[in-house]
Amino acid sequence: DHNNRILITVVFVKSPFDSFANAYIESIKASKPDRFNFINVPLIVDHHRQSFEDHVVDLMETHLPLLKNVVTDISSSKSSSNSTTFTGFVFDLLFVPLVDVAHEFNIPSFIFLAANAGFLSLLFHLTTRHGETRDIPEFKRSNPDELISGFINPVPSSVLPSDLFDKDNELEPYAFSNFSNGRNPPVYSVGPVLDINCRPHTESNLAQHKKDMFPEGFTKRIQGKGMMIYGWAPQVEILAHEAIGAFVSHCGWNSILESLWFGVPMVTWPMYAEQKMNAFKMVKELGLAVELRLDYEQLNIDNVVTANEIEKVVKQVMDDCSEVRKKVKEMAEIARKAIVNGGSPFLSIQRFIEN
């Protein structure tokens, strides 16, 4: 709405995993019909693949040729049109190979990374270590703390993520300043990217959240001591409630942003992927969370978090004099100022458009 000269064509494949995402796309199509053009690439699913990871790989491998054809058609039609100037592509990180298509037409391309700036620092850092080992997980376990340029403190190898996963300039100023040194491609922070409208997930998303996941008698034992939700919890609505004093989180980046937005301090219990690095950033770099674990391994059956450990950190985070609680409240105010007209995300997007 800030630049009526810009038209956007969105090319997408409907998600086979999340009907909520598909419904969200449809709502966007209905709200901005004059400024957006949507191209839906047909969904092809290989039902022989069972795991979620295999489905993601299948989604990329199967649809990449189709997406290349669409991008080629768009580039050809726009380049021959006198009414519009085709200025650039923005690709999801999963479809980086499409950058080659953009290069064929001499059109600038950009990558959207839905992770934090510290993680991007790690990606740049790993390129310098590529020749040392091919086994990245082994590299993580066997090496000492890493000196990564986007982090203030040395990063323990135990918290480095094993695969890829919003950038918030106010939240990560040190990491972002590292990208302004002229040695890296330009980085534009567009966060916090949040959905705070409390839109519910559909029942199809709840298959893994059955009552039988809980130990026998568990519900009865905790009766009167709290609330159980069997299914996908309305996390935004819960975090916004005044009764919530703290949030024991797996440290997914979306959950972190939501918690900070509502000024709710966190206890870190990361499970996998980049969550351990997120926990390290929240506890050690920014002082916005209390550590339960930073290097918890979900698949390690000997790694048990005890009730006493949980009780200790919950008491710590619930202390009214907690420095973490104070910092989180300050960050909530900063986050709200960031998204007003003229805030840092608006300025960053404007720089992106101008450049």
Image: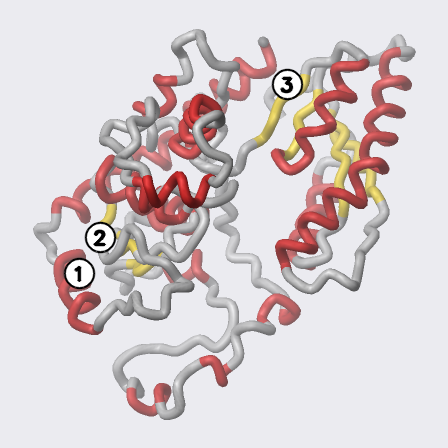
Query: Number of labelled discs?
Result: 3
Separation of residues labelled 3 and 2 (CA atoms): 44 Å
Image location (x, y in percent) of residue 191: 46, 33
**Chain-order first, disc 2 or disc 1:** 2
Q: Is residue 149 above or below residue 337?
A: above
Separation of residues labelled 2 and 1 (CA atoms): 7 Å
User: What residue is drawn where x is 60% and y is 73%?
Assistant: 207
User: What residue is drawn where x is 84% and y is 36%?
Assistant: 65
Helix, strand, or loop for circle 1? helix
**Chain-order first, disc 3 or disc 1:** 3
Task: Report the mark closest to the observer, 3 or 2.
Answer: 2
Q: Name the residue tied to disc 2.
A: 291
Residue 240 visible in the displayed image: no
Separation of residues labelled 3 and 1 (CA atoms): 48 Å
User: What residue is drawn where x is 61% and y is 34%?
Assistant: 93
Helix, strand, or loop for circle 3? loop
Q: Name the residue tied to disc 1.
A: 313
Label 1: how many Cα within 10 Å (few below 14, some 14–19, many 20+): some
Image location (x, y in percent) of residue 184: 47, 14
Circle 1: residue type: Val
